[in-house]
Amino acid sequence: MPLPPHLQPSAPPAPDRRQPVYALVGNPNCGKSTLFNALTGLKQKIGNYPGVTVEKKTGTAWSQHGQPLTVIDLPGAYSLAARSPDEAVLRDVLLGRRTDTPMPDRIICIADSTNLERNLYIVHQILDLGRPVILVLNMMDLAAQAGLDIRVARLSEALGIPVIPCEATNGRGLVELKLAMSRPDLPLPRHSWSIPAPIAAAVSELQASLVENDRRAPLIARAEALLLLTDQDTVRVAGSTTLSPRTLEIFQSWQKRWGTSGTDWAGSLVQSRYDAITGLTANVVRQATAPAGPNTSDRIDAVVTHPVWGWLVLGAVMTALFVSIFTLAQAPMDWIGNHASLLADAVKHRMAPGDLRDLITDGAIGGVGSVITFLPQILILFFFIGLLESTGYMARAAFIMDRLMSRVGLNGKSFIPMLSSYACAIPGIMATRTIEDPKDRLVTILVAPLMSCSARLPVYLLMIAALMPGNQVPVPAKVGLMLLMYALGTLGAFGFAWLFKRTLLKGEPPLMIMELPPYRLPRLRDVLQQMGGRAWIFLRRAGTFILGISIVLWFLAAYPKASAGANPAQQLAQSFAGRAGHALEPVIKPLGFDWQIGIGLISSFAAREVFVSTMGVVFNASADDKENTAPLQQAMGKARWPDGRALFTPLACFSLMIFYVFAMQCMSTIAVVKRETNSWKWPIFQTVYMTGTAWMLSFIVYQTGSALGF
């Protein structure tokens, strides 16, 4: 069957032609990431846009002539009018506002064929930019199952652009897409739509001002004028430009004029655009066959979104997730820990004793190894999240949680970042970029670190072992105590979210409008690729930061040197770290902690799990194997206050666990919060309120328990 004219391959471009830059644009859940992975494979770079923690994904695809093509995967959005930092990045890249990202030469719009009218809204806006566009109609198989007949050639003729039917999950349509991308002469769009008469004059005047005073290209100026008049584009991030005084004056003048006459300029523009889209889809989409009752997604949703059964399904999914994190990850964690120890031993055997060897083994290998040890848990979490997202269940989980989250002033979209924070607060905070309301996003950032991350797990295990030695207490009781710590962190996050939404960041409970995508079979390659990319971001940010901090902490614990013959505990006592512990003791003594525990609290600001290895040094016990803490547990059992009282009593251990539930002891998280909020104000506030809460609750627990004779 011959290809249509717009897909016919053309002659190879000249060798000196600049490498074209394509942007992938589309609604959330339209299959954009799947198409990006299919086009670029492993030729991808993942980072962040400067000034805002929004993921930046670029890759290299190859044309049918072997020419490299740069592809930028832009955040999903329903409109160019930005409501979140994600959507602001999309808008700024397409309008050429960002100096760190080239303005795309061509744009590939991906649309969900099962709901073409809604997906065409952003496509319609992008066509206004006057740049070459390729429209990809994804999920054509699902459209056929729904009885829809989409007349692709008629749609291509109406818009004046190539339209490619596609099924990205199984690779259908990729060859045709690459052929279209290979064309050096992609046509410009020729669509037209009627701007309401009362608004047309304002668009023309604003366009002229943007060209003259803001140095915009004519078509870009027209598109930006339409965005301004939509009156929804309110988000500004680093990289966005501001309007010139003259353009702003014209805009405000028209606003005042329409306010006097009662003209709803924004509503008129949106309605006119939808009228044009409705007329277009009516001409190209036909209901070929009547749907045979509820489809598969509807039947599954009858269970998973049910007021009762939905919670049971969600509980089962979360149980499977946590069981996997705490069981499947154990073997690879042990393997990583053992090989880190072997690497440290190898360095010790090949280097003469001295500060340089200690720096490498205790500072570098020990610090980075403590982070890498927890990588399997991070990978498992991201694997599950990838599966839940690719199957379509994640949106259902947010829908189920919306009612509960609304009670504390948030909506279901905050559930996903908080879920991610169980593994690590860093990816959890990064995930808040999809939350439209700035206050809701900030509240979620402020409470996300209260979710007990995997770095707290070694501390909980050590304290439970010290609190409940031997087999005196049944295993279920120990498990219950562990679950109690996780429950306290979760309740604390909800409690502070409720408080912040009614005081510091007061606002109305947001309405959640979220699309429930159809269920799909996950594409394992995409899930693994996403998991690997996010794990690399975690290692690069957390690992390198902790490496530097660990070296600093090693120096503080190693200097000044004690006299000859001093043991490790004596060396630590008189070191800079030991002196800091003694200085801190008056503050933490009411919590049941002495200066030795104080050193652990200070060191764990680099990473909470460092507390375990620090205690091993403080009490001159080996604690390299975090699951085999018996030597350290015995040494802690022998620890005493100067008056002979036991230091690690059950009450003190419980108080310490409470402290670790609520305290902000993670420098890498603080750094990410600073970058996310572009201010030191919020990470400082977060550190103060969390650590203050931890101190207060530990004080209440220890003093109340002591008064009751525990």
Image: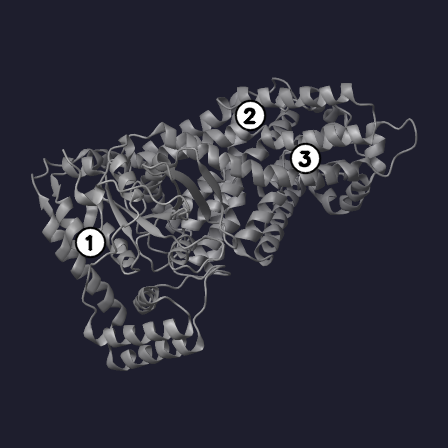
194 to 284, vertically: above or below: below
> Residue flagged by tag 2: what amino acid is it?
Lys
Q: Quadrant of residue 293?
A: top left
Disc count in the image? 3
Helix, strand or loop under label 3: helix
Callout 1: 10 Å neighbours few (<14), some, many (20+)? some
> Residue flagged by tag 3: what amino acid is it?
Ala
Label 3 close to label 2 by CB (< 8 Å): no
Callout 3: 10 Å neighbours few (<14), some, many (20+)? many
Q: Residue at x 29, y 81 (%)?
A: 257
Label 1 close to label 2 by CB (< 8 Å): no
At which x and y percent is residue 575?
A: 83, 38
For marks 3 and 1, give the CA distance.
73 Å
At which x and y percent is residue 517?
A: 27, 41
Q: Please give the label number shown on residue 478.
A: 2
Q: Earlier in the sequence, mark 3 or mark 1?
A: 1
Q: Quadrant of residue 350?
A: top right
At which x and y percent is residue 310?
A: 30, 36
> 403 or 218: nearer the eye?
218
Q: What residue did someone put label 3 on? A: 652
For marks 1 and 2, give the CA distance.
67 Å
At which x and y percent is residue 314?
A: 35, 34
Q: Residue at x 20, y 64 (%)?
A: 271
For marks 3 and 2, give the CA distance.
16 Å
Q: Which residue is the extreme one toward the right? A: 564
Helix, strand or loop under label 1: loop
Q: What residue did someone put label 1 on? A: 160
Q: Earlier in the sequence, mark 1 or mark 2?
A: 1
Q: Please give the label number shown on residue 110.
A: none
Q: How is the image coloured?
A: one colour
Callout 2: 10 Å neighbours few (<14), some, many (20+)? some
623 to 580, vertically: above or below: above
